[in-house]
Amino acid sequence: MTTFIEIVRRDLRLSMRHGMDTIMVVMFFVLVILLLPLGVGPEPTVLARISGGMIWVSALLASMLSVERLFQTDYEDGSLELLVIQPFMLELTVTAKVISHWLITGLPLLIIAPLLAGMLHTGKDGFAALLLTLAVGTPLLSLIGSIGAALILGARQGSILLSLLVLPLYIPILIFGVSAVDAAIHGLPWRLPVLILGSLLIGLAPFSVWATAAALRETMRR
Amino acid sequence: MLNRFANPIRFLRLADQIQPWAAILTLVLFAAGLYFALFNSPPDYQQGETVRIMYIHVPSAWMALFCYTLLAITSGVAMIWKHPLANLAGRATAPIGATFTFLALITGSIWGKPMWGTWWVWDARLTSMFILFFLYLGYIALQDAFDNAEGGSKAAAILALVGFINVPIIKFSVDWWNTLHQPASVIKFSGPAIHSTMLTPLLLTALAFKGYYVWLFLINMRGEIAEARCRALQVSQIQNAQVAKVATSDARDAHAD
Amino acid sequence: MQIEDKISMHAFMEFIEMNGHAAFIWSSYGIVIFVLIWLFIVGVQFQTKSETKLSQLNPRPRHRSGVRSERKTGKQNEA
């Protein structure tokens, strides 16, 4: 358990010390949202109608961009090899890395999202749904993204490849997240999609961690 | 290293026996399927003559799912039993599956024009096929993204398993999304009752596509096995050259390479 | 005789036209057949290319027709 916490703390410390990770992710997120009114016009009704989808799409892209670095730096400086061969279970190491990725990138998105929702005139009914779906959905994004991040280590044109691998797998998260927000905006019940997201998180977490660990072991064998 | 490729010989012997039968069966079934699909089946009371597109669209979509299932099975075999042929089977299957997915998309789009009046509708089935196409592309791209071909196969095997687990979730979510945004006047693909006169050409072309898969799979496997042997030979030649630099014959081998 | 010809000609034209949907039906069948044949040719080319590459790499003499030579090399490898 101490090893587990130590890995999380190490990643957080590294990102605090020289990482612009959090700032970059939030900046990207805000920039995409800024582009939206410039693209479709400033009409509040139009913005309100598409705000749930836009916030979710930009959160998805921001998470995907940041997850590439989840193992990349460790892979380049060789510390990944130590993480794989140490006696501590690799699956737990992966879980720790995913949690720290969520703390560095997912949590800031969650904090900034209400502000952006306000700027897009989402309306207060959508607020709770947006926050709740993002709170359940962003860990899922980190989990699925970690599989892609582990698979592309050492590949040619890794970042483009990552988007090709990960974005199709993100689609269910996007659909359930947006449908909950849209239902809430229209005053409809939105419990079911949130529950589905929650069960996806519980169901896919062990599998994703296993797949990421398997991919990391293969990387070390190459 | 070469010993590991000793068992492809048994596979190649089996392939030699199956391949002519697969070829004959494919050609006969496809000819019969075309005859029934184009000449010997009635136009649908609702869709008219355009129903004939269904006889190649639906089997293509079946093949797309069938090949992805095979991809997941070979990936599982490759990961659990480390069977060298399983990785090669994945490599031989993926392009066929991607092509059938592409064909299902194209024929679905062509079918949509007379049915819906537009070339593309965000119908749940077409959208799922579209996503499946990208899953195939990701698999193929990951396979070829590494300098080490075996490493690429292993990474792609993990991706195929992850994708296979996600396919039902994606399908469910796209259906969910589609019912939320359903336009009122959309005619559904493949209504509840398929008349038996339609079933004959549908099954014939579906079986013909299966035969085509087996035929082409065996051909692709021959190519993949030869490629894998080339890689193994190159590795062993390099090793020989390194171990016995003095031996002139090995030096010549390395030079030839 | 002539009338029969005309009738069969008419039936044939009707078949080609497919009740006004000719372009859709024939183009989709054409695309499917074309793409499947193309993929098949690619597979055959890949097979011949990699097998010639293998025979060039392998210093032992081998025949073009597959299995017998494969079996021979296999036994040599095992030996």
Image (cartoon, coloured by chain):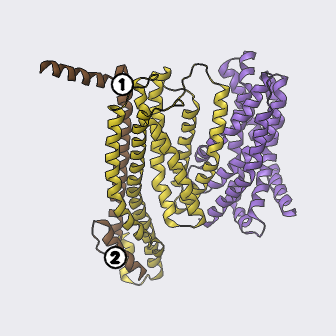
Type of amino acid under label 2 = Lys
The residue lying furthest to the front in this view is: B196
Residue B39: image location, x then y, percent: 32, 31
Q: Name the tint of chain A in the rendering.
A: purple
- Quadrant housing the C terminus of chain B: bottom left
Q: Which residue is mark 1?
A: C23
The residue lying furthest to the right in this view is: A2
Q: Which residue is mark 2?
A: C72
Earlier along the polypeptide chain: callout 1 or callout 2?
Answer: 1
- Bin the neighbour count of mark 1 within 10 Å (Cα to Cα): few under 14, some 14-19, many 20 and up: few
In what element is the residue under mark 2?
A: helix
Q: Name the tint of chain B in the rendering.
A: yellow
Which is more toward the observer, A19 or A161?
A161
In the rendered image, which quarter is residue B250 located in? bottom left
Q: Residue at x 48, y 47 (%)?
A: B97
Q: Residue at x 50, y 21 (%)?
A: B116
Which is more toward the observer, A24 or A111?
A111
In what element is the residue under mark 1?
A: helix
Q: Residue at x 80, y 51 (%)?
A: A100
Q: Of tags 1 and 2, which is closer to the observer?
A: 1
Tell me, yes or no, whether dots 1 and 2 are on the same chain.
Answer: yes
In the rendered image, which quarter is residue A207 located in? bottom right
Say above or below: A135 vs B68: above
